[in-house]
Every structure is written in C-alpha cells, then in structure tokens.
Amino acid sequence: MKHRIIRITIYLLLTAIVTQAQVHGIVKDKSGSPIAGCNLFWSETTQGTTTGSDGSFTLTKPTDKQKLIASFVGYENDTILVKGNNERLNITLHEGVELNE
C-alpha cells in the first residue's frame, strides 16, 4: 500500500510538470519589426522573460494569473489578457510619449 501511494504521488507530480501551460509569441513594433529584449512578466509576480533577437518568447503560465505585461523602453506598456493555455500571442507595442528636456 505504501508503494502504491508513492507511485501515485510521483505520477501526479510528473503530470503537473509536463502539463504546465506555455505561452509563446512574438513582440513587434507598429511597423512589424521584432523588438529584442522586451520584458514580459505576469502581473503581480516576478515571473517573466525577455524576447530573443527575433522578438520571440516562451513563458510558463501560472494557473492563477491571466494578465501578461509587455514592457520596453520608449514604448507604452501593454497588458494582455491570456485566458487559455498554450496560446500563441502576437503583441504590437506602440511608441510612448517623448519627453522634452
């Protein structure tokens, strides 16, 4: 009986690890050029990633979070509502307001 409980526990842990939701996508500017180094993170967490040189990213989705924030210097932040799992996102950032000093 003890071994059976251990096997079931291991199975459940492995299943949870394998079935974590992934969000994939690309971040571009309004002209369609990829934005490398864009920060993406889940709202109210420290879990995030940055885009690669081609603007692409992959990020594990926490089960209790749905708001993904894209942030890059010189552009307005964008908050994306991610409802499903294993979604592919195409995010377009728009240039922010320029400061006159």
Image (spheres, rainbow, N blue to C red):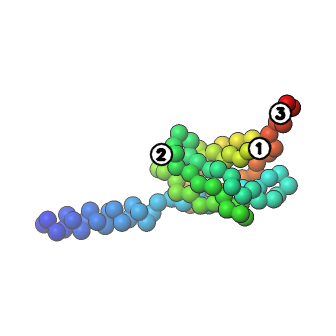
Tell whether label 2 touches label 1 (CB within 8 Å): no
Residue on which disc 1 sits: 75
The residue under the point 81% across, 59% down is 33
Q: Mark 2 vs mark 3: which is more N-terminal?
A: 2
Residue on which disc 3 sits: 99
* Residue type (three-letter) at the residue carrying disc 1: Tyr
Camera-side mark, 2 or 3: 3
Q: Gap in Å between the C-alphas at discs 3 and 1?
A: 12 Å
Circle 1: element type: loop
Q: Quadrant of residue 50?
A: bottom right
Residue on which disc 2 sits: 64
Residue 93 picture location, percent across and down: 76, 48
Residue 8 picture location, percent across and down: 25, 65
Q: Quadrant of residue 75?
A: top right
Give the answer, above or below, for where 44 lies relative to 29. above
Packing grade of label 3 (10 A; few <14, some 14-19, many >=20) is few
* Residue type (three-letter) at the residue carrying disc 2: Asp
